[in-house]
Amino acid sequence: MENNRRFLRFEVQDFLEVRPLNEVAKYVKGKSYNLSLMGVCFSSEVEWKKGQVLLIDYFIPDDMDSVQLKLSVIWSEFINEAEGYLTGAQIIHIDPQKELRFVNYYFQKLKERFFR
């Protein structure tokens, strides 16, 4: 299988709050498995549909605040009862006021991986 990714993915286990774009009050807890500058793979108890747009509050470790991301679901599949569904989604928008925080987190992961 050919890997067409443009950015490195990093394994993480960060806390997320996920909600469909059109349902502001309905939050679902999730956990990220990996991230890149283009997307996030995460688990949640809900199956998200391909093409669905989600708002995610991505809680960066050691930071009391979250970065809001808008994602488009690329795929979602059931893993097991404990983990629920694993979903891959492409980032289509990052809160401009916190975009630098998210990018810095990604580059911190780069440094940890290559410059230990």
Image: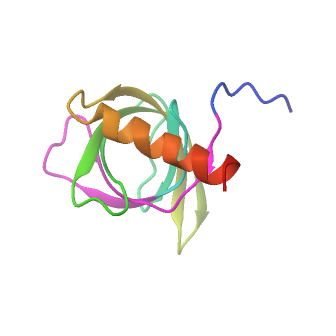
In which quadrant of the rendered image does the C terminus lie? bottom right
Viewer-proximal residue among 87 and 46: 87
The region drawn magenta spans: 8-31
**Residue 46 lies in quadrant:** bottom left
x then y, percent, for residue 94: 31, 30
Q: Nearer the viewer, residue 78 or 73?
A: 73
- The quarter of the image holding the N terminus is top right
Residue found at the far front of this picture: 115
Tell me the residue at 65%/37% (across/down): 8
Q: Position of residue 81 (x, y in %)?
A: 54, 73
Q: Residue furthest bottom?
A: 82
Give the image location of residue 73, x and y in percent: 47, 35
> Which residue occupies 46% across, 38% down?
49
The colour style of the image is rainbow
Asked if residue 106 is among those painted magenta in the image, a careful observer would answer no
In percent of the image, x 54 and y 58: which residue is there? 12
Question: Can you say whether 99 is above or below 88 in the image?
Answer: above
